Amino acid sequence: MAILITDYLEDTVKTYPDKIAFVDRLHTITFCELRKRAFCVADSLIDRGLIKKPVLVFLEKSVECIVAFMGVAYSGNFYSPIDTKMPMERIEKIVGTLSPAVIITDEKHKEVATQFSNGAEVITIEKYNTGYDPQKVLNRTKKIIDTDVLYVLFTSGSTGMPKGVIINHRAVVDFTDWICKTYSFDENTVFGNQAQLYFDLSIQDVYAPLKTGATTVLIPNRMFIQPLRVWKTILECKVNTLVWIPSMISMFANLDILANVEKAPLEKVLFCGEVMPVKQLNYWIENYPKTIFANLYGPTECTEACTYFTINRRFNDDEVLPMGIACENSETIVLDEHEQLVTEPDHIGELYMRGTCLSLGYYNNPEKTKEAFVQNPLNNSYPELVYKTGDLVRYNEYGELVYVSRKDFQIKHRGYRIELGEIDAAATSISGIEYACCVFDSYEDKLILAYKGDVTEPEAKKQLEAKLQDYMVPTEYHRMDHMLFNLNGKVDRKAIEKIFCSPQN
Ligand code: AMP
């Protein structure tokens, strides 16, 4: 039984040394090559005297990125991948929170990385090809324990500060063991990776190959604007397993792609991260009647998925798919507003999660950690933390959990998790804007910014583009004479929603 994720690779490299582990647009890498290159990176980090330190990985989705992750893991440090397209202002906030010891990048991104490095050493991955002492690296892994941190993933923060979710080896091993067992992933599995490697949805794409000898094809994210090219890659690489966000699966259905292409031999299609609309799922099921489909649910704070529902019956287009039941070693607790357990069908409560999947908290952010990771309200006998998901759920008549809505102002747009407060904070930081409120029109799937100030709408958009990631930048702007406030004197998001969002919202 693996304790560290590096143990997966140590085992698999013996069984499948020359099998291809990862494929990107330009390269392939076998398990043996991956281990060698990861050892080179690890060796150099050990030589720098680093242990249990954050290492920022500033690389595009690629084989190199996996080499960096594994190198950091073997060295007993932990990685934090960030988007190479992220605006400088947001990167600087993350660097400020994380204070990385080292930044791993490539020649292409070295100059940018040096700009935000804030004193951290910038190293380029191309250098780490040869020369390492395997015993040194193996000795280092003996010093790592399963509760040591593996990575920190940054998600949107409501006050404008991204939050770094800390995940340890144990949580990833546990999740990977569970998903591989439940969906029979093995050496014949070929994942068509869609998620960026800085999102939790990519976890099985990275770690299931290390455990089982499967292969992951890293599909470039810009390719997804041309779904037919994605399909061609799926066919060429003989992809048989997808774990994608529902927006992407729906896009293929909405474009009726499957009607005009050769069928790829898809055995399993899993989705996670937001509500999967049944109409679009039914389109896939009609085209792939023998394929296994499953709805996974989970926040980054619970590693990836902590509940699952394998589609086992027919759903009408207007029904909601269940989120199912808890994954192994996790427990779902539904509590009402008085923190009383909800067990009856159709009573709505907030979902709390318990188990190995839980994050250790937010990096360098004790306040936010305390708000979200709380003592289990059902246990006053000993310390036991549970995670308050902020998701409202109910049980259906089969005892399966069903997602209802969010409790707060967190939304999912194009599959990305966004705190509307982060957009508000970025907009109000623009000189000339006094008040700003971003609302989400879920019917039209668009972000709308209402603001008061003497900045023109195109200028507001331009400035936000420099502060936020592209998927967070509102597409519609309304400059208002007066901002609307509620009785508590807060910006009235509900009233603004009513004015600018579609009535079906
Ligand atoms: P993230 O941290 O990006 O994985 O986002 C976590 C949030 O996405 C959850 O708290 C939910 O609000 C939402 N989410 C994740 N999976 C599902 C699902 N299967 N159905 C509905 N919402 C989901």
Image (cartoon, rainbow, N blue to C red):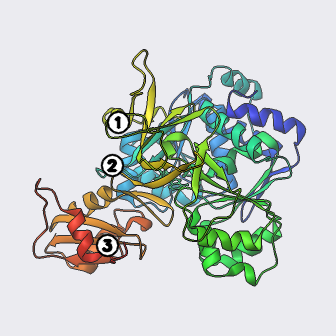
Question: What number is the disc on residue 418?
Answer: none
Please report contact status of discs 3 and 2: CB closer than 8 Å, yes or no. Answer: no
Question: What number is the disc on residue 365?
Answer: 1
Q: Is mark 3 within 8 Å of ligand 1?
A: no
Give the crowd class for mark 3: few <14, some 14-19, many >=20 residues within 10 Å.
many
- Count numbered badges in the picture: 3
Question: What number is the disc on residue 161?
Answer: 2
Amino acid residing under circle 3: Ile
Numbered disc 2: secondary structure: loop
User: With 352 as the anchor, is 458 left or right in this view?
Assistant: left
Which residue in the protein does label 3 denote?
448
In-front residue for pair 168/14 = 168
Work out whether 186 lies above or below 421: above
Percent position of residue 305, x then y: 59, 46
Q: Which quarter of the rendering shows the C terminus?
A: bottom left
Amino acid residing under circle 2: Met
In-front residue for pair 486/242 = 486
Percent position of residue 332, x then y: 52, 38
Please report contact status of discs 1 and 2: CB closer than 8 Å, yes or no. Answer: yes
In-front residue for pair 26/369 = 369
> Which tag is nearer the camera, tag 3 or tag 1?
3
- What residue appears at the point 87 percent right and 35 percent down from the top-left corner? 14
